Image (tube, rainbow, N blue to C red):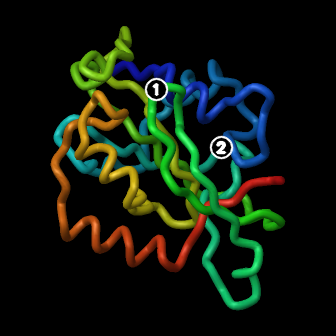
């Protein structure tokens, strides 16, 4: 099985200029080579048949993706409207500023099939394409953000995958994201 970084993941996981809240301690080429040379600890089913999650011990210096919201850090939450790409509509997002979480114990690599990547106009010359990576303290998936679920339900034309909304998964996502937030360096 061959795995490649997609254009979408390359810009988000390895931005230029580099950011501390992206993948640390690996180049895109080294990251991709590691995925192809080292089998995952386990493989999880994703939110759709074309999606798989490969759980790896963190071999980088990448920090945890999310931070629990507490009374002590709530004042550090920020929000704004952003789009992930030029073609997407901006949506409301929130994040912490002024917090640096610990180095993650696990990297959960989100893979889409070659067929799905072709549908999303990001064709790859491999069996699977990396579309994201969750840096976590536990070897389990962080729920997809509610806005990502909604975007996916809107379809490929709006930056999603075309997978219909799963109301129960959405409720679990809201429960998690009400208590956690991503972080950024100002």
Q: Residue at x 58, y 51 (%)?
A: 81
Q: Image height check: is 64 above or below 52?
A: below
Disc 2 vs disc 1: which is toward the camera? 1
Q: Which residue is mark 1?
A: 87
Q: Residue at x 70, y 81 (%)?
A: 74
Q: Earlier in the sequence, mark 2 or mark 1?
A: 2
Left or right of residue 54: residue 157:
left
Percent coordinates x, y for residue 76 in the rendering: 76, 73
Percent coordinates x, y for residue 22 in the rendering: 68, 42
Percent coordinates x, y for residue 14 in the rendering: 67, 30
Left or right of residue 76: residue 41:
left
Q: Callout 2: 10 Å neighbours few (<14), some, many (20+)?
A: some
Left or right of residue 130: residue 181:
right
Q: Which mark is residue 48?
A: none
Q: Residue at x 52, y 56 (%)?
A: 92
Name the quadrant of the N terminus: top left
Q: Residue at x 78, y 63 (%)?
A: 97
- Please tell me which residue lies in front, 152 or 122: 152
Percent coordinates x, y for residue 154 in the rendering: 25, 42
Q: Which residue is mark 2?
A: 59
Give the alpha-carbon distance from disc 2 to disc 1, as whole Å.
33 Å
Q: Image height check: is 159 above or below 47?
A: above
């Amino acid at each position: 099985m061959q795995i490649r970084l997609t254009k979408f993941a390359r810009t988000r996981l390895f931005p230029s200029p580099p950011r501390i809240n992206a993948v640390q301690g690996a180049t895109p080429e080294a990251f991709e080579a590691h995925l192809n040379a080292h089998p995952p600890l386990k493989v999880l089913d994703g939110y759709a048949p074309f999606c798989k999650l490969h759980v790896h011990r963190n071999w980088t210096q990448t920090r945890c993706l999310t931070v629990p919201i507490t009374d002590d850090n709530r004042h550090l939450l920020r929000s704004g409207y952003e789009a992930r790409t030029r073609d997407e509509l901006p949506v409301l997002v929130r994040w912490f500023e002024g917090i640096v979480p610990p180095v993650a114990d696990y990297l959960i690599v989100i893979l889409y099939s070659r067929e799905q990547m072709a549908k999303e106009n990001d064709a790859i010359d491999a069996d699977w394409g990396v579309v994201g990576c969750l840096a976590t303290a536990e070897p389990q998936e962080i729920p997809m953000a509610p806005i990502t679920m909604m975007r996916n339900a809107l379809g490929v034309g709006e930056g999603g995958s075309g997978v219909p909304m799963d109301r129960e998964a959405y409720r679990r996502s809201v429960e998690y994201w009400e208590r956690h937030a991503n972080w950024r360096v100002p």
